[in-house]
């Protein structure tokens, strides 16, 4: 089985990068960089370049995807369809820095997360890169709805 695709999203696709990370995909967010730099690094790192810039996508040829819409759900659908993606609900990527997440002992997080989160959740995750802490709180229902909608459209 081939490894999952890795992505590089240009500066017009920050929300898409975040959602691909939520789905478990290694996705860099290329801000404040020139086109040549983005093309070079995505090629060197074996990443598929996702861009709203038609000319940049053409220059990336087979290793890029021109994203047709400004609508996030449509963007996600395009990428999911193009690469046969599925959502991983295990929370493995940081939405901020793309770092990998590790499970974190609840007791070690006192003072780092709201008391209510500690009381109402059993499972926590911490980013190896930036230290951000995650848990499946009330917002997780909205995340699941979007992911379930993507799955339903794939069936």
Image (cartoon, grey):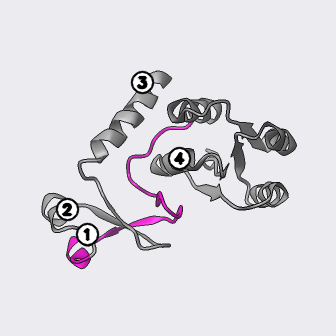
| Residue 90 drawn in magenta | yes
Q: Earlier in the sequence, mark 4 or mark 2?
A: 4
Going by the picture, which residue comes out furthest to the left?
A: 119
On the rendered image, what quadrant is the N terminus found in?
top right
Q: Distance between the residues labelled 4 and 2?
A: 25 Å
Q: Distance between the residues labelled 3 and 4?
A: 21 Å
Q: Say few, some or many: other residues with alpha carbon within 10 Å of mark 3 (under 14 / 14 to 19 / 20 or more).
A: few
- Residue under label 1: 113
Image height of 76 relative to 21, above or below: above
- Residue under label 3: 152
- Residue under label 2: 117
Helix, strand or loop status at disc 1:
loop
What type of secondary structure mainly makes up the magenta span? loop
Residue 147 occupies quadrant: top left
Residue pictured at 23% horizontal, 77% vertical: 111
- CB under 8 Å between callouts 2 and 1? yes
Q: Say few, some or many: other residues with alpha carbon within 10 Å of mark 2 (under 14 / 14 to 19 / 20 or more).
A: some
Q: Depth-wise, is mark 4 or mark 2 nearer the camera? A: 4
Q: How far apart are marks 2 and 1 (CA)?
A: 7 Å
Q: Depth-wise, is mark 3 or mark 1 nearer the camera? A: 1
Q: Which of marks 3 and 4 is nearer the N terminus?
A: 4
Q: Distance between the residues labelled 4 and 1?
A: 24 Å
Helix, strand or loop status at disc 2:
helix
> Whole-percent x and y of residue 123?
25, 61
The span shown in magenta is 85-111
Helix, strand or loop status at disc 3:
helix
Q: Distance between the residues labelled 3 and 2?
A: 30 Å
Image height of 71 relative to 95, above or below: above
| Residue 2 drawn in magenta | no
- Residue under label 4: 15
Pick whichever, 36 or 61, lies toward us.
36
Q: Say few, some or many: other residues with alpha carbon within 10 Å of mark 4 (under 14 / 14 to 19 / 20 or more).
A: some
């Amino acid at each position: 089985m081939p490894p999952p695709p890795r992505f590089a999203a240009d500066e017009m696709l920050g929300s898409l990068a975040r959602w691909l990370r939520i789905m478990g995909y290694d996705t860099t967010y290329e801000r404040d960089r020139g086109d040549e730099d983005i093309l070079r690094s995505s090629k060197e790192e074996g990443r598929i370049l996702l861009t709203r810039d038609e000319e940049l996508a053409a220059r990336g040829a087979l290793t890029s995807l021109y994203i047709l819409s400004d609508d996030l759900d449509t963007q996600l659908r395009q990428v999911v369809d193009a690469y046969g993606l599925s959502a991983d609900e295990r929370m493995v990527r940081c939405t901020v820095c793309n770092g990998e997440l590790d499970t974190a002992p609840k007791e070690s997080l006192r003072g780092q997360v709201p008391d209510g989160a500690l009381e109402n959740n059993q499972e926590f995750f911490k980013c190896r890169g930036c230290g951000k802490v995650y848990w499946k709180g009330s917002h997780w229902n909205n995340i699941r709805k979007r992911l379930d909608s993507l799955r339903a459209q794939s069936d």
